[in-house]
Amino acid sequence: MLSFSINQNEEARLSVLKSYNILDTAEEKDFDDLTTLASAICQTPVAFISLIDDKRQWFKSRRGITEKEASIESSFCTYAIASGNDIMIVENATLDARFIENPLVNMENGITFYAGVPLINKDGFALGSLCVVDKSQKQLTEEQIIALKIIAKQVVDKLELRRSAIELAKLYQELIDSNLFIQGFAAMAAHDIKNPMSSILLSAQLMKRRLGKFHDKSFEKLLNLNINATKRLITMLDDMIAYSKSPQLLLTQKQFVNSTELFQTVISLIRVPDNFEILLPSENYLLNISKIALQQILINLLTNAIRYNDKDRGLIQIRCSEDVERYYFEVEDNGIGIAREYQEEVFGNNFTLNLTDRENKKGNGIGLSTVKELIKILKGIITVRSVIGKGTTFSFNLPKT
C-alpha cells in the first residue's frame, strides 16, 4: 500500500470530530436508513458511514458487514478524505497501486469496487466518508454519483443536528446550574440579612423601653445604630435586586473598594459576641473587585467562624495580600476545627457535619457550597486547612482582571 496523509490540521480535525460525541454510540435508524438508501441506489451489497479518528475507522452505520471498525492502515476512507475531492471512486482495487497489497482486497470475496464521498462539515473538516463497496468491478452512473453525494450531505446534516442538540443540552444544563446557584446564593443572602435585621429589632426593643427618657445620649446612640443598620440593609437589598435582574452584574460590575472599609462593613453586618475579637490586616488595600460577591463570601466565612467556636475567647484573623495578578484572603479562627476527611466534603451541596453551633442549631449545608461556586465563577480558588480543637483557616484568591 502507498502511504497517505490527511491534508489539513489533523489535531483540529480530531477535536471537531470529538465535539459531535458520536464515536462508539449505538446504532440509529436515521443513519441506517441512509446507508440502506445508498446501497440500493448504487446497487452494492455493502454500504457504511465511516468516521476516522487517530487510530481507526469506526462505522456509525453499516450494511452488508458485521465489523464495527477497521484499522486506519487498511482503510480506503482515509484516502477519500485526504484526496480533497468530492468523491473517490476505485473501479478495480486489484489494479490500483494504492490498494494492491491491502488485506481487504486480497482476502476471499475482498473489496474490488469502492466509492466514498467525504463527510465535510460546515467548517471544512472531513470527518469520515459515506462509502459503497462491491466485490466485483463496476462503474457508477452520473445519477448514482449525484445521489450518493446528496445522501452524504444528509449524513452531515444529521451530524450537525446532533452537535447542535448537544450544545443546546449543554446550554440548558448551564442554565439549570445557574438557577441553582442563584437559589443557593439567595438562600445564603437571606440568611445573612437576618443579622442586620436582628440588630434593628434589638435596637427597637431597647428604644421602646427608654421612650420616656428624653435627652438621653444612649437613646440617641441606639437610634443612630438603628438608622445605620437599616441603611446597610437597604444597600444590600438593592445590590441583591440588581443581581437578581442581571446575574452577570455580580461577576462583571467590579469597583474599587477600600479593603479596611469593606472588612468593617462586613463585620457590622454580622452579630459578633462580646467574647469574640476579629483582627483586621494592618495594611489597607485598594481592591478592584465585585463588592457584593466579596461581602457575601466574607459574611459566610465569618459567620461560620463564630457559630462553630467553643472557646471562651473567640479569635478570628482576617488576612489580605496581593500580587500582580490576584488578591489573596484568609479567614482563620480558633474554633472547633474540621476533621481531615471532611475538609473537601464541606464544600459539597447540602453537606453538613451534623454539628450544632453556639446556639444549638445545625447548619443546612448551603453556605460553603455556594461560596465555593461563587469563587469558582469568579475564577478564583478556595481551600481549607484545619486541626480539630485548634481552628480552621479558609484561604481564597480572586483574579484582578
Image (spheres, rainbow, N blue to C red):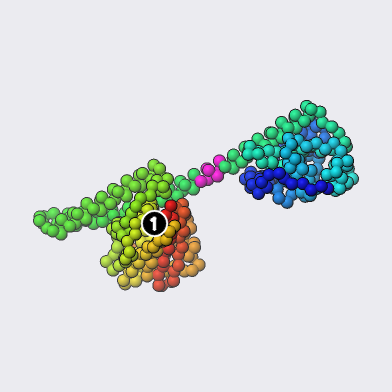
Does residue 109 lie above or below 197 as drawn?
Answer: above
User: Is 139 part of what is drawn in magenta?
Assistant: no
The amino acid on which the numbered mark 1 sits, given as a three-letter code, is Ile
Q: Residue furthest right?
A: 108
Please state which of residues 73 and 361 is positioned toward the viewer in this rendering: 73
- The percent coordinates of residue 168 (x first, y second) are 55, 41
- The percent coordinates of residue 51 (x first, y second) are 71, 44
Q: Is residue 249 left or right of residue 94?
A: left
Does residue 285 lie above or below 36 as drawn?
Answer: below
Q: Is residue 284 left or right of residue 59?
A: left
- The percent coordinates of residue 40 (x first, y second) are 79, 32
Does residue 398 lie above or below 162 as drawn?
Answer: below
Tell me which residue sits at (50%, 67%) in the image: 341
Does residue 232 lie above or below 272 as drawn?
Answer: above
Q: Residue furthest top?
A: 143
Q: Secondary structure at mark 1?
A: helix
Q: Which residues are magenta?
A: 168-174
Say which quarter of the image contains residue 159. top right
- The percent coordinates of residue 321 (x first, y second) are 39, 63
Tell me which residue sits at (32%, 56%) in the image: 258
Please state which of residues 312 and 361 is positioned toward the viewer in this rendering: 312
Please state which of residues 219 and 5 is positioned toward the viewer in this rendering: 5
Tell me which residue sits at (28%, 54%) in the image: 196
Q: Which residue is mark 1?
A: 297
Is residue 270 something one can see in this rendering?
no
**Dot 1 alpha-carbon crowd within 10 angstroms: few under 14, some 14 to 19, many 20 or more:** many
Q: Is residue 177 left or right of residue 289?
A: right
Say which quarter of the image contains residue 49. top right
Tell me which residue sits at (40%, 43%) in the image: 246
Is residue 383 something one can see in this rendering?
yes
Q: Is residue 375 left or right of residue 227?
A: right
